[in-house]
Structure formats: structure tokens, C-alpha cells
């Protein structure tokens, strides 16, 4: 059974445990006021030399999304997000528990668009005193469908939000997988477009931990206290420092994502070659093949994956390539998929992986 | 300018002020523990002789919807409702402020269906520990589109909710307009299908006030205290008692709605006759004509109405017939609509109002 | 049985019903955007010519206290108040339901002092990231013990709050009874010292209603929307306008309080004369005699009053003089108290009511 | 500088890192559904063979206290706790953020008493519909003052709570230090008296983590979902399992506390011998000497400790003995205290440590 259900079923990268062991015997100022935490923040800041950002560490993605939302919103303000957004679908009502309404819009291939933001904004404003006021737009990058925002898209979202006086936040649960994809921006660009974003650690090889980056200093108010209030503030905050140092000092953060994306691209190419329709086509570490009941049942005997949703007669499935997945695993997965659809070698299409990737890059530009 | 924007811009029925004057000099036990409140509850209960219900009075529809939701839900549970539901669109995030998530589904002509409930339920349950658990389904009757649930539809919703262990609540902001429509049930039937519902007073001729009916006694816990906690508990609670007595002792509640529905039916028939497409066709006190920009601009000079939403080149408008609207008003409104579309008498369609109404009744049965 | 339990068991002043009747047949813009509401606000503003204030109407004291608290506080900030404050003891957890912590201090004869504020502030700040940050101090005037702040006390509270960067709010549930007491300030002075305060209507002869005065314009943000969100925004907002016009156009607001205070002073003087120890000595419309069990049992047969708390062998009772109480009522109440303690006419003390009042005035100045 | 400010400035016990390393390469079901978590729960359950308990793991003490409170309370119910309770003083308003009011009472040497519970309960119930209903009583063991509940005290609290239909929860942030003190009960007894309690890991040698024990099965509803909703549910839940295994498999949990308590007893004895008044006298790992300004200033040059509060001319200081503190540290600390007060060897009192401990034991029984 190969585990393809998500990318957080594995342990941490060895660097984390090594550094924890090395640093474990010291005495640390509590609640993240220590030097190891400071070092980690400096390391992260070194990836964004153009900007002056503040950094907070939180235990889970639910925690980081809740905190960013609380930071940006007054009690009578809401957040615009896609129907498919994690904070709407997979956070067990965390945002609502904190008292805020999510104003959902339809996504476009997993993405939030300036047009959708504007439409929702106008709708809310026209019913003033009846709807909460939108004050924040939230995106995920990669999206929940594994697609990745382009530079132009981020710029356009930023411009629209400025125009409408909205903050823009980005859920970076799997940000590494976006940053190593064929895009034309780096982490250093993000603070220019975003008021806040997270750099997920849990899915990038940590035991746990998400870093929240505050790029807009007017939002840097009361965060540490809110973290305490919500039970997020670890007494031994230095553990975050250690972990993020392990992640960034030798760029494990990027290397892991590169491995995942590459294996994912191989698998995605194979699946297309075999003739599987894909629900969406992304460049991160997730593939969404659409399977018949028979194909799904066959594959489920050997592979552990999630059924994303049912559409007509198809089961849209989600395959996630975590960093525990090897080249051999992917090869085996690919063979199983080939078998499930009755694909035979002789049918091999003439299109090569390179051609497909080039085609993808072109798509990405549009 | 004829005011068609809503049905709560007018004052109260004279009976309310008369009774207030008559009863104003007494001393009353506070917070609704008085005899006038008791009398009003008995009067309301007399409309539902088959059931044993508990009754609470609240100041606004936002208050009554929030309270019913809080009563039914634990902090980790959510409410299934239509995208178009008042508690989702027009309550300024009241449900979320109280900490609960609304799980929205698409409506079918304004209505929630058992199928939509089941689909949302299954989606939530399949992502256990990621989505709030649905524990309540909420409908409005009439719906926000002026459509009215049939007996069979209510029975089917009740059955589905029982099957899935959900409570079922009904926002009865304009319930009177449903009860006097061509339906085959009365207020006495409602407690059999619904765990809770409201009997709106504000839109039925009171100064203010909504009655919340608790039909399922297991939900009758802590309500009075929650009302105090949310600032809803009037010190001089007897004011509700007086008002609801005025509404029910001579059935003003029903008479007002009958007048509104009749005038509304006349106008709706005219508008169809003139050739206006209707966004939906209801039997309560709201018409939703779809207007061109030119028509809208012309009418807006003489009539005060709400633009519901824009669709393609049409402006879907909402005309509400409050009890301040007279036969003469409707006649004038009708003439203006005729003029706006260039309708001439000679074009009169052969279909009569009676035929249209018969056709409507047939539609209602389906 | 004479009702002395509180001052909101009676009906409204006749002016309210007369004006409601006169104005009932018009059509009004909804949610308080009408001219009657505007007129009422202008009338209230005319009592504070030196300041430019914003005004909102709310249904209950719980609503007005909650709203003022929400307006002033971020989610991680708290309000300093006396242990005896209404918002701590009698609001069923309204402030906490809205997510805020009340930081309580001991009162000094019902009053909050600058020293107590400073001590609590320092305690909170010294445990930064462990305690919510105080950002608001809340007083009641009259206090829950019927005592009244002097000009100097209000000035000192204002100065301390400015120093510590706290907002200062005043619960004016019974403000009229303070303003007609022997104090040396008027309503016009209040906005100079207070960022927000309420002018209670329910206990001053309205059917219901509290006016919230926003003196500090930086707090005037999102209030109307928050009111809608909490279910406080009446559809027919003009009802508040009518009521507050009735209260202020002929100064019924002050006349009622003068009558109550005068009767209360008479009774308080009598009770002291008879030898009852008083828990506190106020100048508003409440007396707090300390009774033995026998006295209490005897009086409870004829009088309906509240037992405030038990201390040692005494029952501290609260007698409230509402505007339904007549001179004859007070005379009867006085006789009963005389009888309960076995007081005989021949024992009459030489001190006169005037002397006592003069003495009180001196006390008040200190 | 010896760090005596708290017991969570140190790293974790080596067993934690060893086991993490050993188990790090596996693939685990997520959100705590794995076998390592199961093993840890079984190990903890083996310490309470007489009862059938459910166990949840949470990241911080704020998280565990919030969760226990939420589990027990409806939105209109409150928790009775001491003024000095951690959940009132040191959780940054976490309970209020979750919407609940803390009903505080004065503590008796840090402890909550049945009498205080009953008094607060009666006060709340007598003002029904004005105060939140108490439904939970919360204690800490050891208390915030380092005192420890006796068997009889726990039994009496349990009996009173049953009588008043309250749940009883215990904050066990430092429970180990209570269980190894001279008391006559073990962990196995706790579920008989308590509906819920926590077994703190952070202060007992883990990187982080608190175990919440649900002894009353009627409270075991929706907890996992609430944990997700509040951002507490770690994706890689097995990390808790590993850590709690490390803590309990060789009883490190108890051994660490024994070392801390023993060193603490030595220091406390010395301080008394030197003539320092103690604010309270406990048997756990905290001493509360009352220092003059001069003594405090002198000691603060060498020791890092917390000033608990100021009383008259004394500074009540809190010394905490974490497991990083050695016998040599304590000896040095003791010498500094001796010097600060000018204590000389020849003054040695005749009373021995054993005599003091015996005396303490007698005190404990009372």
C-alpha cells in the first residue's frame, strides 16, 4: 500500500532531530523570545532581502489561517475566499468560531480572480448594514487544486485589493511546491503583493509548524497575545526556531519540494499518456485523475488516496506526492494506473514529457 | 413615489396602540413573566391546538434566527441553508458572530430540498474532523423569492432531517403570507414538521417583534438566559404580549396577509400580461419582474423598489406589497409598468386572471 | 403590595403613546434612517451644545453595554470595571459572549477609582502576553449602589484613562437620576470626560430603548453594522425617534427623575431616622437598608423588593423608586418600616431632612 | 544567573528525542489516529486501571484548559474558579474568547472550597436570567500557589459538585508535582472525583503537550472536531504519542517531579530557617518568599525569578524549581538567600528538616 493521501503522514527531515538534540540542553527564554527563534527569523528574512517583515510561528495550518484572518478583520468584517479554499472547506469552522464570515466565490481553476473579488465586494457594499463588510481576500498558493498563481495574477490581485481597500493574505501551506514550480517570482517578491502569508512547515518536513509572515506592518498588532489567547503560543517557543533553521539553513525547504514536484510531473505525464482525464492540471505535488468506479476500486487495493468528489460517473481522486515518496514508488503507481485503464506499451503516444512541460509552461503564462 | 421596497416601512396596526394605551398604567412583572405575555402565548397556542409548544418573543428577525440557531447547535455544529437564505445573506454575519458556520447549498426556486440537504450532509460527514457537523437545516417560508413550501415538501424535509438526525427550523419572517396562500396546511400543522419556527410580527403590523415557537421540547433549554446574554430580553416584556394579542385576537395577522397577497396577485398577473419576464413566480407578497435598464430607470422615477440582482442585461427587481399599499396604489403601479413596456390595451392577452391563478395552483401541487 | 423591586415594571409616559399614534400612519425609511430619528438625535444633541456627538439607539441596557464594549475593544483587549458593575453582574455573560474579558476591581462605595484602574492596568501590563490588555474602563452613573460621581471624580477618571491610553465609557441606565441629583455638572459636560455613554430610556419612562452617545469620533466605526449583526437594529427604527422625542421635548426625562429622587430622599431620611443602618447612602432613586430577618419577613408581606445580598446577620435590601411610585406609596412604605423596627413618634430625632440633605451635599463635595 | 522563573525554559528529556529518532521514518495515519498515539494512551490508562477514560492531546495549557471548559459548558453557562486560577489570570482571556464567563471566588491558600462553590452557585441562581448558570468548577493541582489538594478535599469538592449538578475539572499543568508529594492518593483515584483533568507534559520534560483525560463519558462529544476548529489538532499527531510514551514508559514523569520537589523542599526549609516569611507553604516545586526591596534587588543580580505581587512593603516572589535545576544550583541559591538576609551559621535553629517536614504532613492532613 503506497500512501498518497497527503504529504504529512511522514516524519520530519533528519536535520530537525539533529538540531533539536544539539540544542536541547540549554535554558531558553520562553514564548519565542529566545535566540534560536531569532536566528530562524533572520534566516527566513534572508530569503526576502527587499522587504522588512515580521514573523510568527504557529502550530497548524488552521492556526495560521485563523490568526491571519483575526489580525486583518474587525468583528463586523469578513473575508472573501474561493468555495474550494482550505479555510472554508477544511478548517472545521475555525474562522466562524473566531466570529468571522467567509464570503465565498466560485474559483477559476482553483484560483481567486480580481473579477470575483470585485463582484462580491459590490454585492456586499450594496446591501450595507445587511452584509458584513469585506476587508480581506484570501488565496492559497498552490491552490487546493494544485494550480499555482503567476506573477501577473498576484500583481492583479494586489492591485484590485488596494483599489477596494482590502488586505490580501495567502495560505502557504504548501508554498514550497509553488516556489520551485516554473514560475517567474521568488519568496522575495511575495511581500510586495501580499499583506500576510504563511510558509508551511508541516508539509515541508517539520514535525509541525507554520510561519506567518506579516508584510504590512499596520497588521502587526497584538498577534503574540492573540496567539496566547487561542492556545497557540508554545511555552518552549525555541522548538519552532530550531525547526525552521533546519528547514532553511541548507535549503531543505526547496529541495524537498523540487523532488515532490518532479515526481508529480512524471506521474501526471504518465496519467495523461494513459488517457486519464485530469480534473485540473497543476505543477505542484498533486494530481487529480478522474476515475471510473472500476478503476478506482482496482487502484484502491494497492494505493491509499483520497476521493476528492464525485462528478457524474467519475470519481475525482487526489494523489499527493509527499517527500516520503520515492522514484520507485511513482514508477509502481504509474504501472498500476496503466493496468487499471488497460494501457499497453505499444500505444505510447509520440508526445514527450518535455513537450508536455513546454505546453504547460505556455498555459501557465496565459 | 410609492414605497415598494419592503413591508416594514409602515407603522403598526391601530389595535396595537389601542391596547398599549389601555394596558399602560399597570405594573408588570419584568422580562416577560407577566400575564399579558401569557395571554398572548395562549392565543398563539390556540392556533396550534394539536401540539404543545413553547414560545419566546424577540425584537428582530436577526435575533430570532440567531437564537434558533444557537438553541440547536453545539459550538462545533453548523446549519445547512440555501445560498439565498436571509440568515446567510441579510443578517450581517449574525450566525458567524455567534460562532457557527452556515453550510450553503443552491436553492431550487428559493427552496431547500431534501436532496441538497443529503448531499451537503454526506460531504461534511466524509471529511470528518475537517468540517463542522451539520445538525440543523434552515428554511424560510415564504422563501426569499416569495415562493411557498407545499405540505409534501415540508413533510419530505422533515423526513430527511429525521433520517439524518438534523433539526429543522423555519424562518417565518413573513409566515402570514404563506399561510393565507393557496396551500393545504395551517399553522397547526407546522409543529409536526418543524422543531422550531418563527411567527414574524414586524412585517405583519407590529411595531416590532418576532415570536419563536419551540415545538421540540428538547430544544427548550436556556433560551431566556441566552436572550438576556445577547441583549434581546426586554425589561418590559409585556409589550410583546400586548402586540401579539392585538395581532391574533381578531386575526389581523391573517387579514393583513390576505390583503397583501391579493394585491400582489393582481400586480403579478398584470405584469405577466404586459409581457414582463418574472424571475420567479410566487404567491406571497413579492413580485420579481426582470427589467431592462430603460424600464428600470423610468419606473424608478415613480416607484421606490429594490434591485435584487443583475443578470445578463436584465435587472431583477423586487416589489414588496406591504399592508400600507392600497388597491389604488397597485392600480397606479400597474399602469406605470404598462407604460414602461409600451403595453397597449388592444394587446390584451386572452388568458384571464382566473386561468393564471388556476395554472399557478397546478404548479404549486407539483 | 407596593412594587419596589425596580423602576421598569411600569408602562411608558403618556407622551410616548400619543406621539406614536400621531406619527403611526406615515411611511418611514428603515433601520433608523428616518426623519423622526434624526429629530430625536437633534433634540438630544441640543442638551450637549458644546460637543459634536454621534448617537445610536439600542433596545436594552445589555445591548448598549455590549455595543460600547465591542466598539472600544480589539479581540485581545479587555475592560476594567467594578465587581459590582452591571455589565459584570447582571448581563448574563454578554461581554464574554462577545469574546471580551472583564478585569474586575473592588469598588469604593460603588465607584471605580483612578487608583484601582492604575493598579489593574499595571498588573495586566506586567504579565504581558498572559493577560488581555486593558483598553477600556467602564463606570455606571449612578452606580449600582445608587451613588453618584462628582465632577472631580469624573475629571480624575478621565485624566487617568488618558494617561494610560484607555477609553472611558459610562453606563447611563439611570443617568437621569444622577443628572438631577445635587451635582455640579450637566449632560453637556459628559462628552468632555467620556468617550461613550448611554442615556437610558427604559427606566426613564419609555417602552424600551437606550441611546448610546459616541463622543470620541474615532470610535464611530461600524456600529450600525454591529447592531445589525447582534440583532439590535430595529426595522422600524423610527420608534426610537418617537420615544426619545417624547422624553426630551418637554424634559419629561428630567422631571421623572426629580420626582423619583425626591421621594427616595424622603424615604432614605425616614429610614435613617428610624435607625436602620444603610449599606450605602445615595442621592438617586435607590435605598439600601440593612434588615434583620424578622424585619425583612414582616416587610415582605406588604412590599415587593429585592434582597441585594446577605452580610453577617443582615439582609441588605434594595428599594427602587420608579416613576409609578407616589407620595402616598412612600408614606405607606415609611410607616411599614417604622413599624418593622418598632419606631415611635416620640423618639423623633431633632435633625431635620434639610440638615441631612445639607450634610449629604457636603459629603458629595469631598 | 540561575533561571528560577519557571519550569519550561529547559529542553526535553533525552528519551523524547531518542524515541522520535527511532520512529521518525514510518508513515502514520494523520490527526492522532495512529498506533503510537494509541500506545501512549494505553500507557497512561495503565496508571488508572480502575477507570475507563478517554484521552486527547493538546499543545499548550491554554489549549487544554479552553478545551475542557468548552466541552463542559453550553454557551450560556460559566465556570467557577479561584481568583488566582491560571485560566483566569494567565490565559490572556482564552475562556472569554471562547464565549464563557469565569465566575471567580476567593481562594483559600490557593484552593477552591466547597463553601465558595456553593456561595457563588447560590448567588448566580438567585439572579436567574441575569447571570450565566454555573455548570463547571475548575481547580488546579498543585494550585498556582504550589499547595496541593488532599484526598478529603477532592472528595468534598466532588460531593459538592454532584450535589449542585456541576462538572469538576482539574488543571494538571504540574500534576506530577502533586502526585509525588506526601498525599494519600494516586492518579488512579483522580477519575473518581473529577470529570476531566489534564496531565501536563510541557513542565514534565516534553517539548510540548498536555493530555486531557475525560473521565465522564458524557463529556466525550465532538472534542476532536473542536480541537481541529481551534487549530489544536496536529497533522502529525503521532508526535504526542511518542512524547507521552517517553514520559511514562520508565516513569520519567514521576522521577522528574520527585527531584524537583525534593530540591524545592530543601530550599523552602532553608528559607524558613533564614527567617524569610513565606507567602504560602507548598509541597510542590514552587517557593514564595516575601522579600524586602533590598533583598529582592540583591538576589535579582544572581537569580532570575518572578515577582508574583507586591503586598505592603514586601515583594512576594515566585521561585520555580524546574528539572534543569541541580542540587548545586539549589545550594548556591540558598547561600545567596542567606547572604541577602544576613543570616549567619551560628544562628542555626535547632529545628531540623525532618521536623519541618513532619509538621508539614500534619498540616496537610488538616
Image (cartoon, coloured by chain):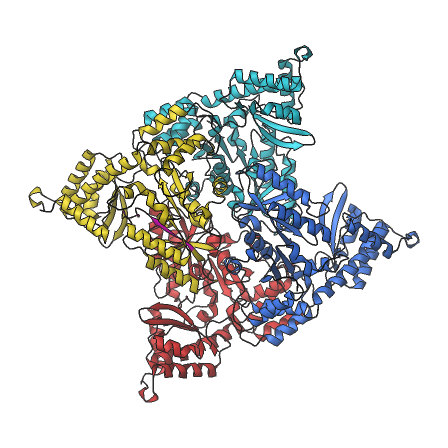
Chain colours: A blue, B cyan, C yellow, D red
* Left or right: A195 in relation to D214: right
At x 25%, y 53%, the residue is C311
C225 versus A174 height, above or below: above
Tell me residue A354's x, y (percent): 86, 57
| Span of residues in magenta | C135-146
- Image quadrant for the N terminus of chain A? bottom right
Picture quadrant of residue D140:
bottom left
Coordinates of residue C295 in the picture (x, y in percent)? 18, 45
Residue sitting farthest toward the front: C50
Please state which of residues C230 and A71 is positioned toward the viewer in this rendering.
Answer: A71
* Residue C93 can be seen, yes or no: yes
Which of the 4 quarters of the picture holds residue D244? bottom right
* Name of the residue lying farthest toward the top: B346
Q: How many marks?
A: 0
Image height of A25 relative to A241, above or below: below
In the rendered structure, the answer to whether residue B84 lies left or right of residue C97 reads right
Which residue is at the far bottom?
Answer: D346
Residue C133 spot, x, y in % from top left:
45, 58
Return the residue nearer the eye: A18 or A317: A18
Q: Residue at horizontal 50%, vertical 27%? A: B188
Residue at the limit of the structure toward the left, as seen here: C346
Between residues D312 and B35, which one lies in front from this camera angle? D312
Evaluate whether residue C314 shows in this view: no
Horizontally, residue D47 falls left or right of residue A360, namely left
Residue D204 to residue D350: above or below: above
Q: Percent position (x, y) of residue C154?
A: 32, 51
Based on the picture, tell me whether residue D228 belongs to the magenta stretch. Answer: no
Amino acid at each position: 500500500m503506497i500512501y498518497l493521501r497527503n504529504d504529512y503522514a511522514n516524519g520530519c527531515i533528519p536535520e530537525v532531530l539533529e538540531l533539536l538534540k544539539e540544542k536541547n540542553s540549554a535554558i531558553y527564554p520562553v514564548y519565542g523570545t529566545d535566540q534560536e527563534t531569532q536566528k530562524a527569523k533572520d534566516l527566513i528574512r534572508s530569503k526576502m532581502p527587499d522587504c522588512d517583515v515580521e514573523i510568527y510561528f504557529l502550530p497548524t495550518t488552521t492556526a495560521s489561517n485563523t490568526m491571519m484572518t483575526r489580525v486583518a478583520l474587525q468583528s463586523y468584517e469578513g473575508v472573501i475566499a474561493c468555495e474550494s479554499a482550505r479555510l472554508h472547506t477544511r478548517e472545521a469552522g475555525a474562522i466562524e468560531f473566531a466570529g468571522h464570515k467567509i464570503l465565498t466565490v466560485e474559483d477559476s481553476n482553483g484560483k481567486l480572480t480580481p473579477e470575483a473579488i470585485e463582484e462580491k465586494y459590490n454585492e456586499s457594499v450594496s446591501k450595507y448594514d445587511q452584509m458584513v463588510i469585506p476587508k480581506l481576500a484570501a488565496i492559497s498558493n498552490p491552490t487546493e487544486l494544485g494550480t499555482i498563481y503567476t506573477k501577473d495574477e498576484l500583481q492583479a490581485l494586489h492591485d484590485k485589493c488596494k483599489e477596494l481597500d482590502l488586505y490580501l493574505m495567502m495560505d502557504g501551506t504548501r508554498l514550497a511546491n509553488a516556489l520551485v514550480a516554473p514560475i517567474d517570482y521568488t519568496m522575495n517578491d511575495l511581500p510586495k503583493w501580499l499583506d500576510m502569508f504563511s510558509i508551511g512547515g508541516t508539509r515541508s518536513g517539520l514535525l509541525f509548524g507554520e510561519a506567518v509572515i506579516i508584510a504590512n506592518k499596520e497588521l502587526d498588532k497584538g498577534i503574540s497575545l492573540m496567539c496566547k489567547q487561542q492556545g497557540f503560543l508554545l511555552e518552549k517557543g525555541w522548538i519552532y526556531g530550531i525547526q525552521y533553521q533546519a528547514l532553511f539553513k541548507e535549503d531543505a525547504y526547496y529541495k524537498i519540494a523540487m523532488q515532490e514536484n518532479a515526481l508529480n510531473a512524471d506521474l501526471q505525464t504518465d496519467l495523461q499518456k494513459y488517457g486519464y482525464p485530469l480534473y485540473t492540471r497543476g505543477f505542484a505535488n498533486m494530481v487529480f485523475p478522474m476515475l471510473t468506479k472500476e478503476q478506482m476500486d482496482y487502484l484502491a487495493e494497492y494505493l491509499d488516496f483520497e476521493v476528492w468528489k464525485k462528478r457524474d460517473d467519475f470519481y475525482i481522486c487526489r494523489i499527493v506526492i509527499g517527500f516520503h515518496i520515492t522514484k520507485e514508488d511513482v514508477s509502481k503507481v504509474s504501472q498500476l494506473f496503466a493496468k487499471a485503464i488497460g494501457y499497453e506499451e505499444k500505444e505510447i503516444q509520440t508526445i514527450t514529457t518535455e513537450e508536455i512541460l513546454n505546453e504547460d509552461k505556455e498555459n501557465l503564462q496565459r
